[in-house]
Amino acid sequence: MKLQKSHLLELQEIAQQAALNAGKYIQSKLNEDYEIGSKGTNSKASDIVTEVDINAQKIIAKALQESIQKYDLGWLGEETPDDGSRLVKDYFFTVDPIDGTLPFTKKTNGFSVSIGLVSQSGISVLGVAYDPYHDVLYCAVKGEKAYRNGEEFKINYNKNKGLTFYSDLSFVSSGAYPFLIESLERTAKEKYGGALKVVDHQGAVINAMSVIENAPAVYIKPHRDKQGGGCAWDFAASACIAEAVGIKVTDYFGNPINLNKKENTYMNNEGIRFEVW
């Protein structure tokens, strides 16, 4: 079944409410004690999981359940195993209940709720992202405008000179990091007449939204051999929103991103780029 514009707008409303419900719960737990566990990954940022992540995903799943049944949608959530429905359904919801669990556990900004709807071919057709820390809701449907707290979301160019690089904390220790920094510092000086500012404490979704809100800016995840490098739930919502404001989202090599690879959900072999020059 191909979803029409009216279907997507209906699903957007439902996803928005699901994100707000989860976000309110997450914010209520920010200063409380909760259990923190490990997923056994090789990245500090993606290894942490809390009971708040798990409970927030349950809140979202419950809110989306009726629409999943109505439109025969698949499901891919970060805190539950991949059930393979994404490979057989025409569309699937992909959810990260807390994108940026590390800043959440540190009680700082940079975390968000992310809900995306992706076609079986790997294209994001709906994106909802909620920043509970600042109470900001972003949303978009493919082919339509993007919105920030109900108002049209547009690229905001910072009047200050220079360039901002939004980086995942895990990339800072990478061997490729110094080379990319050197290249971006040169661009900041030669093209924008200022210094390079590096922000490395936020989750993937807030990094992508920050690029739009603080241009010229880039969020780059280079490819790598080790499994990881983000998953569909990290980029589905933000890719749809970014493309709705006019940003071409690509993998590290400049190719269109595929959010539904058959072999696994990881994007380490491709990397990703959100850029506003």
Image (cartoon, rainbow, N blue to C red):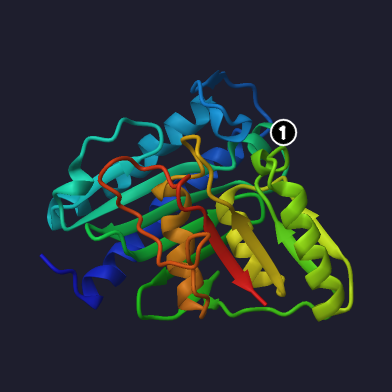
> Could you tell me which quadrant the N terminus lies in?
bottom left
Q: Using a 10 Å C-alpha cutoff, classify the residue at mark 1 as few (fewer than 14 neighbours), some (14 to 19) or many (20 or more).
A: few
The residue positioned 56% from the left and 77% from the top of the image is 153
> Could you tell me which quadrant the C terminus lies in?
bottom right
Residue 136 falls in image quadrant: bottom right
Residue 131 can be seen, yes or no = no
Residue 60 can be seen, yes or no = yes
Position in image of residue 44 (x %, y %): 62, 30
The residue positioned 29% from the left and 63% from the top of the image is 11
In the displayed structure, 100 sits above or below 5; it is: above
Which residue, given by chain and number where applicable, does mark 1 sit on?
106
Position in image of residue 227 (x %, y %): 46, 35
Position in image of residue 93 (x %, y %): 30, 51
Position in image of residue 108 (x %, y %): 73, 42
Tell me: 130 left or right of 173.
Answer: left
Label 1: which secondary element = loop
The residue positioned 59% from the left and 31% from the top of the image is 43
